[in-house]
Amino acid sequence: MATHEPYTGDKLERLTGDAAAAMARYPKARSALLPLLHLVQSEDGYVSPDGIAFCAATLGLSTAEVSAVATFYSQYKRHPNGTYTVGVCTNTLCAVMGGDAIFDELSAHLGIGNDETTTDGAITLERVECNAACDYAPVVMVNWEFFDNQTPTSATDVVDRLRAGHDVAPTRGAQKVVTFREMSRVLAGFTDGRADEGVGAGEASLRGTLLAEANHWSAPERPGAAPADASPTSTTSTPSTPTVKRPAKARTPRARTPKATAPAPGGEHSSIDTPAGPPEGLADVTKES
């Protein structure tokens, strides 16, 4: 039984128009494959066989080429996904800070394992290699929105509120978490107005910089580099390091072994075949040989 609407009528017309808008951003149409995969995922809830065929026909690719890309990146799902993807980072830093404990707690609480979905279709749980937010470890992501400094208790509270239909705000970034399909459309390049682009780096990310400023620390200058306060248009050149040439390695000439020559007519050796002796400087070597 089909798990999504067929690519006909209004759906096909809508997808075709959005695909054209995505393709217009690139000098070559096939460069829009990644956005188009997110686009069909926003319609079907996963990258369906019909979605693969649509991308291939739209971009002039084979279905095998499209499938190769769709199966390479973990953000593309090849089977129906939950309304919310809850990704728990279990890479080294997050793991030692509690990421493994968070995943185990959520798995037991939801009754599902990695890349599995709850029976109500609300939550898909997955292990994530790295959320690129190590300074906030352990980190959980819900449809790729950040939930920093999590614990098993706080992560369980998040999934329970999502399943209950409550609005849930991430710890930073967008105003609230949206569904998997809605986020897939954002990843396809179509803004929904939720992003708060005015938010800069958080306190944890700036801690090292602030500590360096408070203690007047600076990186050591590279030997031979221009002073930090030097004008970029300065004509003063930095003396170059002299090049030290190594003496050429003495090579011992190889002795030549005279070739046997056939006697010339009349019993005399031909002047052509008779060696004239070693070149000057090789006499001693020839004698030793």
Image: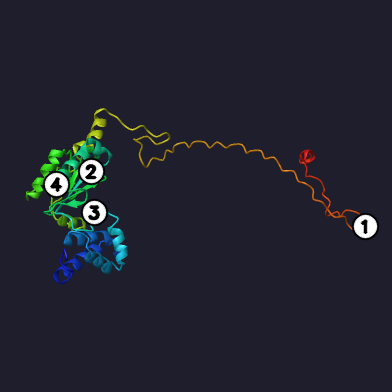
Is residue 137 among the parts visible in the rendering?
A: no
Q: Kindly identify the amino acid type of the residue bearing the numbered disc 3.
A: Gln
Q: Which residue is mark 2?
A: 89
For numbered disc 3, what is the local secondary structure?
Answer: loop
For numbered disc 4, what is the local secondary structure?
Answer: helix
- The residue at the far top in this view is 215
Q: Nearer the viewer, residue 70 or 123?
A: 123
Specify the quadrant that holds the N terminus.
bottom left
Q: Mark 2 or 4 closer to N-term? A: 2
Specify the quadrant that holds the C terminus.
top right
The image shows residue 139, relative to residue 60, as above or below, that is: above
Q: Which residue is mark 1?
A: 266
Q: Which residue is mark 4?
A: 110
Is residue 81 among the parts visible in the rendering?
A: yes
The image shows residue 188, relative to residue 222, as above or below, that is: below
Residue 172 spot, x, y in % from top left: 15, 43
User: Relative to 188, is 234 on the left or the right?
Assistant: right
Task: State how far apart marks 3 and 2 are (Cα).
Answer: 14 Å
Task: State how far apart marks 3 and 1 are (Cα).
Answer: 94 Å
Q: Which residue is mark 3?
A: 75
Task: State how far apart marks 1 and 4 are (Cα).
Answer: 110 Å
Q: Mark 1 or 4 closer to N-term? A: 4
Near mark 2 (Cα within 10 A), the count class, few <14, some 14-19 or many ≥20, is many
Q: Quadrant of residue 8?
A: bottom left
